[in-house]
Image (cartoon, rainbow, N blue to C red):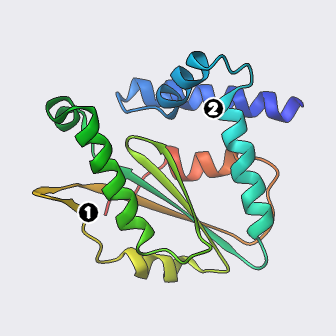
Amino acid sequence: MVEKKNLAIFGKILIRYYDKKKESPMESVIKPIAYKYKIAEDPFEEFSDQIIKDIRNSLSNEIVITHFHFQDLYSYFKLLGEQRSGEIMKELKSIIQAHLRPYDKLYVLGPRSILTLSPDCKTEVVEARFDEVVFQVNHLIVDYEIQFMELDSPIDSIEPIWKHLLVSSKST
């Protein structure tokens, strides 16, 4: 229970870090839904628990976690409206899914972040899958950053993933 509380605190610290950088925080997507539907549990904590569970269930040898961080599309979303914005996000998600295996997992963290889990895989293999991918939706080519993390043993906390993939960044 203490670890879950620490994880929730770390998540809120991470959100504050993103707020200071004027980036779209994951919590901005999750919190309004929790409030609207009167969910008492911390949605960030539940989401983190689900990822840990999926990693444990998938981990036979190694697993590669990939984080896609897209450019800020707020100005396009504002002009195009909610429906068209949803179509852009759906298209970005489908481009990623086209390069995944059927048993890989995909999580939409927010309007700028998508996380994938690729079990029984090496970083080099996943990098090769996305090496030449261009995220183009109609006339718009979306810029992005991609980070990889390879795990070869189970983890008890999502904190190392958040620190490695969401706080540090490498441009492509």
Q: Position of residue 139 (x, y in %)?
A: 9, 57
Quarter of the picture holding the C terminus: bottom left
Identified by mark 1, the residue type is Phe
Image quadrant where residue 14 sits: top right
Foreground residue among 52 and 107? 107
**Residue tagged 1:** 135
Q: Position of residue 131 (x, y in %)?
A: 34, 77
Residue 128, above or below 50: below
Q: Residue furthest right?
A: 1
Q: If you read the primary sequence from the N terminus, does the residue marked by circle 1 or circle 2 appear first?
A: 2
Task: Say the numbered circle drawn on residue 27.
Answer: none
Foreground residue among 4 and 159? 4
Pointers 1 and 2 in contact (C-beta within 8 Å): no
Image quadrant where residue 77 sits: top left
Residue 69, above or below 151: above
- CA gap between label 1 and label 2 equals 28 Å
Task: Say the numbered circle drawn on residue 11.
Answer: 2
Quarter of the picture holding the N terminus: top right
Residue drawn at (14%, 58%), measured in percent from left and top? 138
Q: Residues within 10 Å of mark 1 (few under 14, many from 20)?
A: some
Going by the image, does 84 lie left or right of 165?
left
Q: Secondary structure at mark 2?
A: helix
Going by the image, does 7 lie left or right of 138?
right
Residue drawn at (38%, 44%), measured in percent from left and top? 112
Identified by mark 2, the residue type is Gly
Q: Residue furthest left?
A: 139
Q: Secondary structure at mark 1?
A: loop
Q: Position of residue 45 (x, y in %)?
A: 71, 34
